[in-house]
Image: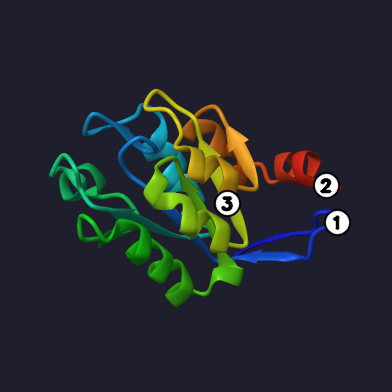
Amino acid sequence: MLELEIPGWAPLRLEHLVLDLNGTLALDGELLPGVAERVEALSVDLELHLATADTHGRAAALVEGLPLQLALVERGQEAAQKLALVERLGAASCAVVGNGGNDAAALEAAALGVAVCGEEGLARPSLLACDLLVPSVLSALDLFRFPRRLVATLRV
């Protein structure tokens, strides 16, 4: 569990981190460099979930051996099913990291929503739904490894 006291926010007690795959952890079906090591480090404090429609058909291979629970969502139902995953886990104990339009509802519902504007870009609905925007997935994952960064940025 990751506990955070951010001035101006209700206390955060994060147990789950829900991650998007394509455009967030991966680009063109390949895991981005540095992601695997960060995922390993984060798994000590958080239960990690990967929610994806598996656009490139490589999700299972990409996460093999990593401490990620793979949640495959149906194409055309991505937004609703990602939101349902966050709600099932308990939105108050979830953080979400994503970039696509189908991540917006989950980003907004979660206790903390972090949008990534990487090589694939960032969908406007996710920009409007997030609590924080970062330039890369490595930056996003490092926020949870070094949570004082979250405090410094989000305090009111």
Is residue 17 shown above or below 86? above
* Residue at x 43% of width, y 28% of height: 121
* Residue at x 60% of width, y 65% of height: 1
Read off the residue under disc 1.
8
Residue 31 appears left or right of 96: left
Tell me the CA gap for discs 3 and 2: 15 Å
x, y percent for residue 130: 59, 47
**Which amino acid, mark 1?**
Gly
Q: Residue furthest left?
A: 57
Residue 74 appears left or right of 25: left
Tell me the CA gap for discs 1 and 2: 6 Å
**Which amino acid, mark 2?**
Arg
Q: Name the image quarter holding residue 109.
A: bottom right
Residue 36 appears left or right of 61: right
Is residue 30 shown above or below 71? above
Is residue 13 shown above or below 146? below
x, y percent for residue 96: 50, 54
**Which amino acid, mark 3?**
Gly
- Mark 3 lies on a secondary structure that is strand
